[in-house]
Image: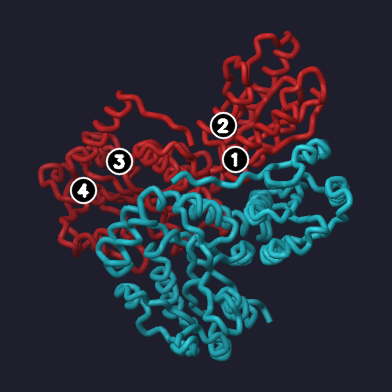
Amino acid sequence: MTKGKLKIFLGYAAGTGKTYQMLTEAQELKARGIDVVVGYFEPHARVETIAKTYSLEFVPRLRLEYRGTTLEDMDTDAVIARRPQVAVVDEFAHTNIPGSRRAKRWEDVVQILESGIDVLTSLNVQHIESLNDQVWHVTGIRVRETIPDWLLDEAAEVVMVDVTPRALLHRMERGVVYSPEKARQAMENFFNEGNLSALRELALRQTAHQVEEQRAEAPIFEGDSAAVSTGTECILLWLTPHPATAMLIRRGRRVANYLGCPCIAAYNESDADAVCQHLAFCANLRIETRALPGVDPQGALAAYARARGVTQILVTRFTPKLIPLVNQIRDLQVTIVSERVRTP
Amino acid sequence: MIQGRPNPDELLRQIESRERLAARGRLKIFLGYAPNAGKSDRMFDEAHRRRSRGQEVVVANWGNATKPHHGPDRGRGQILPNLPIHQIASRKPEICLFDQMAHRNSPEASKAHRWEDALALTELGITVIGALNLQHIAEYQDAVEKITGRRAADSVPLSFIQAADEIVLVDIPPDRSTLPPRQISELRELALLVAADVVEHQLQSYMDDHGIHQGWGIQERILVCITAGGDARPMLDSASRSAKRFHGHLLAVTVLQPDLNRAAEETLQGYLDYARRLDAEVHMLPPAGDPIGAIIQFAREHRATQLFAGHTRQSRWRFWAPSNIDRLIQASEGMDVRLFPHQRS
């Protein structure tokens, strides 16, 4: 069976109009005779957006008991059983109710795609894993609900839903996005023009990157301009138990994505227990990991890097014996990745 | 973070420019990447929303038949009042819509282009909402021509767009297009990056206005440290490749040394020329007792996100000696430091 195609409507904050534009597209598809259903839609009491669902078929939600209350979520099996051509699934980065079969909505979306159904979904740029540190740097908020970057690379299309921060702030003030109390809190904390502009720039650059990525993967026909060459770089991440390693992994993933090159990771085998969280994180971001003998970790790292054709080793500045390491590996590029610092 | 206090002249200039802006009408531009990609529809949508909120909206009319609109919102502009351009100043509506802003006016008109009419109206306190295509931005016409093989006759300068209060990128697939998908993809990418650069520009002025002297590093800024003590060219090549892939900015810096012999001086100048050929912004810092400190300060001031430096061979001249590398790493908060193998110059 051919896999379904994923289309992501990318925004940079609540209220930019992602869901609205996604539903507009769903309506257009329906008008063209395509079988579209809504797998999940979050109304947020936004009147104009709700109006856009008019006449679309909804797959009934799943009801789950959680700590004495009944909660609702997408019924993935029902969406698949219904066999539409296209399913609309709002809020790609959503975390499912504890006890659900899959922990994350994106995992449900992957299931739907596997069943040969196309999916339209909505996402804010701050939920992209490799941007987590940058988003924290700009907003002071550590976003917990993230999606791994490869999902964007596998999407058939990523489109930017753009609106200016000013227009967004007006929408907030008019109470279109949130209730007045929630809007006031949001504007005090997160929604100021500087933050929003920075997030908007991130979203524009991310979308540009995805557009380029897709083109690089598309077959080239005669007369087309050449695809981007990926070169021969290879990035190796040196994992240590230090918490800043999470930041190293995100940064490494991002640099490798942009350079279009492989990204692998290595660690000292005697650290195996201490880095197990980082290893899981690497797996989630599709970074291959390798334990190296612990007697002479620096020598082992250098030898492994040379054997694998690594061009650049990325380390945190909290790496034990960093300076000797840098001096020992003088035939390869070593990048000391710096954590971002927020000044209050 | 750099603790910098803006000087009084600078403050006065900012206050004056803000006062001038307050009296001015706003300029908002919907930027599309290809014809028929929905930017006029977005513009008319906004006009209708504003009208329904009680604002007075007119469409500027140049007396010639304007192109009919395509797509689901066909003809929505027609239900808004149309007004000849020369009457708008005296009528003073709150909002005036401009389609095809790059269009050249007829020879008898007072302004050469529509976008100049738009600026004149904003000076009178009228808000202008306009639509524009990527192919009409003068500075990007070469790039667009490379993609599509065609060049639009009329254009607006990039400064017009940068000076706009708001721009909105309309990233909607074109309704009916004769362009091959690959060209559309390239135009989309370019338009997204143009919009990102405009937003970066606006963000920078916002931060300057608010006294925030910290880079957020949304756009990668790669700084290459050049000395005569090792071949800088592989480092510059790599930095240039990274800058291109990240759509970032490339800078090169050297700290001048008064005691450099003639051969070393020529080598250094050769590297700086090489950097310029790679479109790097090249800076030469005056001789400093503490060159590492000077470079760190420069990197902060120029909001570098990545700093490229080369190992030197262990010899008399130990600019990047271990202790200095250590210092660089310790001082480089928020900046990646990439060390390159020593290359014989």
Q: Are marks 3 and 1 on the same chain?
A: yes
**Where does residue B108 sit, x and y in percent of width and height?**
22, 34
Pointer 1 residue: B335
Chain A colour in the picture:
cyan
Q: Is residue B97 left or right of residue A251?
A: left
The tag on residue B115 is 3
Residue, disc 2: B299
* Dots 2 and 4 on the same chain: yes
Do badges 1 and 4 share one subunit?
Answer: yes
- Which image quadrant is residue B235 in? top right
Marks 2 and 1: CB-CB under 8 Å? yes
Marks 3 and 1, the one that precedes in the sequence: 3
Which chain is indicated by disc 1? Answer: B
| Distance Cα–Cα, label 3 vs label 1 | 41 Å
Q: Nearer the viewer, mark 3 or mark 4?
A: 3
Chain coloured red: B
